[in-house]
Image (cartoon, rainbow, N blue to C red):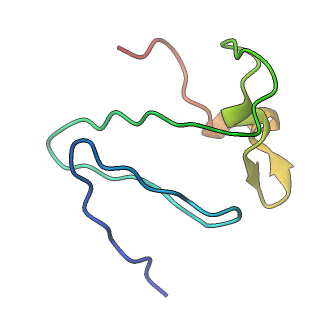
Amino acid sequence: MPHPLFPLRPGMGWRIPTGCLHSFFTEAESLDVIAWRPDSDFGPTDDSHPMVSRTFVNGVSASEMPEIQTQGEIE
């Protein structure tokens, strides 16, 4: 079953419910996403971040899956 597409616009906000599959695609332009995780209980670092440690893929924390993590410097 294909996932529905929702066009994003500058300044738009949205919520992704717990457990929902999601991804972002762009064609010619980059996409900056500012994520807010209300379950964050500490200040993130490059090596320890709730967007990674509290994201699960098939029941496994993304912190244990380096192959899906962004690598290197982001400009």
Residue 12 lies, with reference to residue 72, above or below; the image says below
Task: Please give the name of the residue rendered at 78% of the width and 35% of the height, measured from the top-left corner.
Answer: 53
Task: Please give the name of the residue rendered at 57% of the width and 37% of the height, measured from the top-left corner.
Answer: 36
Q: Is 53 on the left or on the right of 35, as rendered?
A: right
Q: Position of residue 69 (x, y in %)?
A: 62, 33
- Seen from the viewer's position, the closer of residues 50 and 56 is 50
Residue 29 lies, with reference to residue 20, above or below; the image says above
Q: Is 42 on the left or on the right of 71, as rendered?
A: right
Q: Is 66 on the left or on the right of 20, as rendered?
A: right
Task: Please give the name of the residue rendered at 69% of the width and 12% of the height, measured from the top-left corner.
Answer: 45
Tell me the quarter of the picture where residue 48 sits. Answer: top right
- Residue located farthest toward the bottom when viewing the structure as drawn: 1
- Seen from the viewer's position, the closer of residues 66 and 17 is 17
Q: Position of residue 37 (x, y in %)?
A: 65, 39
Task: Please give the name of the residue rendered at 27% of the width and 55% of the height, measured from the top-left corner.
Answer: 8
Q: Is 37 on the left or on the right of 65, as rendered?
A: left
Residue 20 lies, with reference to residue 48, above or below; the image says below
Instruction: Tell me how many marks there are.
Output: 0
Q: Position of residue 44 (x, y in %)?
A: 70, 17
Quadrant where the image shows the C terminus = top left
- Residue located farthest toward the left when viewing the structure as drawn: 28
Q: Position of residue 32 (x, y in %)?
A: 34, 33
- Seen from the viewer's position, the closer of residues 66 and 47 is 47
